[in-house]
Every structure is written in C-alpha cells, then in structure tokens.
Image (cartoon, helix red, strand yellow):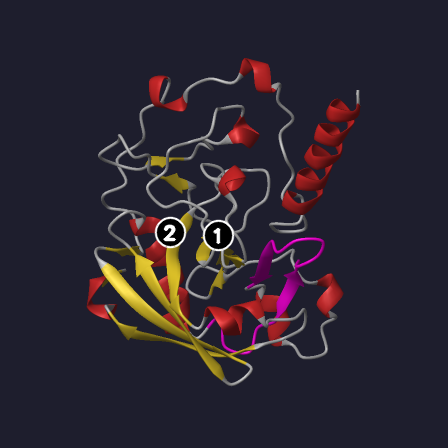
Amino acid sequence: MKIKRQYWLKSVFLMVLISGLALGGCATKTTNPENTTNVTQNQESSPNMKEYLPRLEGKATVIMTVNGAPITIEIDGEQAPVTAGNFVDLVERGVYDGLAFHRVVKDPQPFVAQGGDPQGKDPNFPIANLGTSGFVDPATGQKREIPLEIKLEDQPEPTYNKALGRQAGYSTAPVILPHRRGAIAMARSQAPNSASSQFYFALADLGFLDGDYAVFGYVTSGMDVVDAIKQGDRINSAKVASGLENLKK
C-alpha cells in the first residue's frame, strides 16, 4: 500500500508540472498505463510537409541573451524542420526581444523555464497573467500555430499532428530529439497543433515528455545562465548567429 501511495503521489506531481507547460496550461490526457501501445508499431501516416513554411533545412545557431549573459542554442532543422523553422523565423523577426520568462519551476526539483508569450512585450502586463498567447502574423492578422512534429528513431520522416508519448497513451517514444537537460522545446495546449511562440528550456532530463512536446534544439553553452533564470526575467535579445541561409519562408 505504501508503494502504491508513493507511485500515486509521484504521478500527481508529474501531472501538476506538465499542466503548466503551455498556453494557459498544457492539459494532460488521462490514460491507463496497462493499455499503452508501442508507437513504433501503430504509427499513422503523416501528411506531406515538405512545402510547409517557414522551415529550417539544416541547422542554425541562436544566441539568446538573458540578464546580460549569452545562451548559445543549436537549432536542429535536420530533425525538426517545421518547429525549428518557426523558432528561427520568430527570432529573426525580433519577436522574443524583451519577452519574459513567465513560468520557472525549480522546486521541489528542476523542471522548466518557459517564456515566449508576446503579451510580455508590454512591461505593464502582469507576469502572472502571461502564458495564454502566441505570435500573430502581421501579414495575415492570424495567430500562427504549427503542427506537432515528432521524429522517432526508426522513422525516416517526422510524424505530424499527433502526440506519440505517454500523455497520448503510448509507451515511451524512442525519439530522435529527447528531453534531456538543456533541450529547448515548444509549449502547447492540449491540442497537438497549438504551439506558436512559447518555448521552454528543460532544466533536467524530462524523458516523460518525449513524444508529446516537440524538442527542436539544445543549449550548447550558457546552461549556467539558463539555470539562473527566475520568473519575470526577460530576454534581452535573441539573434540568429549562423544558419539563417537555411531558413525557407
């Protein structure tokens, strides 16, 4: 009974952590672990996304400055071209400059530092109210939302529009881009294709998120700067240092 209670408490704790990963809270899908399916055996076909724009066909390096210190991020458009392309495009547009990290979870154990809500551009907007918005494309006046993009180790192309991890009822997904410490990934709501501009840094290995949220790169230097981020800290600037020629839009 004691073991079962500990497992239940751990499960509740993980659900609470995950519930804040996105726009107003990334709702989890309740599943029965005993009824999970091996995703590599039951993968639905993905639509042809070769023409989706923006996309990053290759890699890029982004330098994000927080609290006056640089964070170097390698953006992987080889494995996640759509997700990476969206982020690099937003960096190039200057969308992230001045935005706040509105959700930072470090206790009782390191989890994520999340930011990217454009509402935070207004210094008078309450930090506690951030987390519900995304990038509105000035060319269309519409919010840009990108398809969920997950590439498995045994698949030549990513799967789109479908979660493949534990929250979706599958066993642990063997993904190409896992949630190891230093990963950068897109936050989203319960809808798979709802990621926009909000992103998060993984402050620890978070393998239980693999397959449900799209990782698109890793911090290669400046992880100490990421670890020091506090709620309310702002991105001084984000610039594409290399690889911009790989962005198609």
Say whether residue 114 is magenta.
Answer: yes
Residue, disc 1: 186
Task: Using the image as rendered, state which of residue 121 and residue 237 is in the foreground.
Answer: 237
Nearer-the-camera pick, 11 or 62: 11
Q: Which residues are magenta?
A: 95-115
Q: Can you say whether 8 is above or below 96 in the image?
A: above
Residue 83 - label = 2
- The amino acid at mark 1 is Met
> Hey, which quadrant is residue 34 in on the image?
top right
Residue found 59% across the figure and 38% down from its top: 190
- In the picture, measured across the screen, residue 103 lies left or right of residue 222, that is right
Which residue is painted at 42% across and 42% down in the image?
147
User: SS for tag 1?
Assistant: strand
Where does the image place residue 111, in percent across and percent down from the top left?
Answer: 60, 53
Rendered residue at 37%/51% (across/down): 83
Circle 2 crowding by C-alpha within 10 Å: few under 14, some 14–19, many from 20: many
Give the distance between the C-alpha atoms of the residues marked 2 and 1, in whole angstroms.
8 Å
Circles 2 and 1: CB distance less than 8 Å? yes
